[in-house]
Image (cartoon, coloured by chain):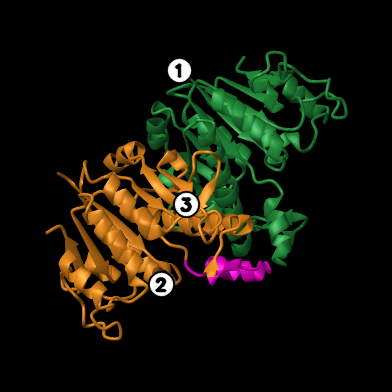
Chain colours: A green, B orange
């Protein structure tokens, strides 16, 4: 079985021109089939300020109203996605930018309203791999921004970590899929203040223990849920760490594999 | 030889939600392979005002500086392109949004500086049809916005009429290509004030005569140059008129074919 690498980068890389350039250079060199998923960074917030748009908040949580969705679509699917694609082409890595609406690749439902109406936020329900598969065999890297659609004309703001996990799961029957979450830390840390306290291999048992001890940083919880969800659905392995884990032999990171 | 329809819509359709919806409904019903190319409309200008951005002008012409290019990329490749793709999916027409950077489909050079430096404006030099061809055979409609790239990491603002013509020319060996320019008039008019004065068949000879008489409206000149450029490069036919020419039997329009 061929390996497929699905790599997610977050705001810390998107917002740092040099880090992004470095990352895209190394991404281009990856020889196996590959998919890039990128988050949004701070540009959308900056633009919202420039346009005097107020960020809608309910109970301390951001709400994606129509204007915010438009802004996100412009920034994520327009500016960021196309800049990445153009840079990859420069690095002779053929790439095509995607939202989940393109090729009907990722179908979502608007998150049901319970206590909070999050607005135009999508929960992924289906990944269609056919078109992507065709592109991968032509040595083209799909580049996803964090937007999906409901197949009824509505675009939906969707968590980029989730998109990466769902893509990895969607391909797990055809490829040995490896999911990489690149972020500012060297992996899952025992002590969040100490970047050397990386848990190099995280089993589900250890994860449960750490959860019980409440020693997982709050920001890591949804990410790790995505990781174990992927592992539970035949994804071969998940790695968390700095982008250098992709190209430096001894770059410390956390690996999660099915036991 | 199979027919490929390449259809360009301009700002008058983009800016009118109902007209756009109608058009996309009818576009979805076209059974032959098809490519959509869309212009920008007024949204970019509106946003520029909202952000207090000044439009750079030199000798009465707009200049695409870095900020304008960013704005255009957000509006054309983000908001407009993805809204169109999502609406096509709703109409069960599978579609993927493209700039010329995606799949390295349209390569341009920054327009050489002579009297005026237009900034980040691209002149098309090459169309790569391979990826698009694969998508067309999978019954997927590529949707192009008016942005290309120079293969050195630079996106370039590019005339949508030109993109449509160059795509039609690029496919002319594999398909019987038909190029449709949809706009607010019923075609090339003898009297620009009278929408009934349509020239139904425009030959190169008649065109030369009209040019000599200076009876072609200024706005039509570059469009007609694109048309005859396409016809001179094996495009089967070019039609100009209202979108209804695509689906209404008796909708008057101008047809140009090689003589």
* Mark 2 Cα-neighbour bin, 10 Å: few <14, some 14–19, many ≥20: some
Residue A145, magenta (yes or no)? no
Give the magenta-colored segment's residue range. B41-60
Residue B44, magenta (yes or no)? yes
| Residue appearing at x 40%, y 58% in the figure | B160
Left or right: residue A141 compared with residue A164: left
- Taking A153 as reference, is B167 above or below it? above
- Looking at the picture, how far across and down is residue A255, in whole percent? 67, 19
> From where the camera sits, is residue A47 visible?
yes
Mark 1 and mark 2: Cα distance apart in space: 48 Å
| Residue appearing at x 33%, y 65% in the figure | B223
Give the residue number, with chain letter if any, for mark 2.
Answer: B12
Looking at the image, which is closer to me, B60 or A23? B60
Please state the chain letter of the residue tagged with numbered disc 1 in the rendered image: A
> From where the camera sits, is residue B26 visible?
no
Give the residue number, with chain letter if any, for mark 3.
Answer: B122
| Residue appearing at x 64%, y 19% in the figure | A247
- Dot 2 falls on a residue whose secondary structure is helix
Residue A49 sits in quarter = bottom right
Mark 1 and mark 3: Cα distance apart in space: 39 Å
| Residue appearing at x 73%, y 24% in the figure | A207
Give the residue number, with chain letter if any, for mark 1.
Answer: A2
**Closer mark to the observer between disc 3 and disc 2:** 3
- Looking at the picture, how far across and down is residue A166, in whole percent? 53, 35
Left or right: residue B147 compared with residue B126: right
């Amino acid at each position: 079985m061929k390996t497929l690498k699905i790599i997610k980068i977050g705001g810390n890389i998107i917002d740092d021109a040099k880090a992004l350039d470095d990352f895209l250079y190394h991404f281009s060199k990856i020889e196996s089939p590959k998919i890039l998923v990128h988050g949004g960074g701070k540009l959308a917030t900056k633009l919202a300020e420039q346009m005097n748009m107020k960020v809608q908040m309910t109970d301390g949580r951001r709400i994606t109203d129509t204007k915010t969705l438009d802004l996100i679509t412009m920034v994520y699917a327009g500016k960021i996605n196309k800049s990445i694609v153009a840079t990859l082409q420069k690095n002779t890595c053929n790439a095509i930018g995607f939202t989940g609406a393109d090729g009907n690749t990722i179908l979502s439902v608007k998150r049901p309203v319970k206590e909070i109406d999050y607005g135009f936020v999508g929960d992924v329900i289906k990944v269609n791999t056919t078109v992507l598969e065709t592109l991968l065999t032509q040595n083209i890297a799909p580049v996803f921004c964090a937007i999906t659609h409901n197949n009824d004309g509505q675009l939906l703001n969707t968590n980029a970590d989730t998109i990466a996990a769902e893509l990895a799961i969607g391909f797990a029957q055809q490829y040995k899929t490896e999911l990489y979450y690149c972020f500012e830390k060297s992996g899952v840390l025992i002590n969040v203040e100490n970047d050397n306290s990386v848990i190099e291999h995280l089993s589900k048992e250890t994860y449960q223990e750490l959860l019980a001890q409440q020693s997982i940083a709050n920001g890591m919880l949804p990410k790790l849920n995505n990781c174990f969800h992927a592992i539970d659905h035949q994804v071969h392995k998940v790695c968390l760490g700095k982008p250098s884990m992709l190209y430096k032999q001894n770059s410390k990171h956390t690996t999660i594999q099915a036991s």
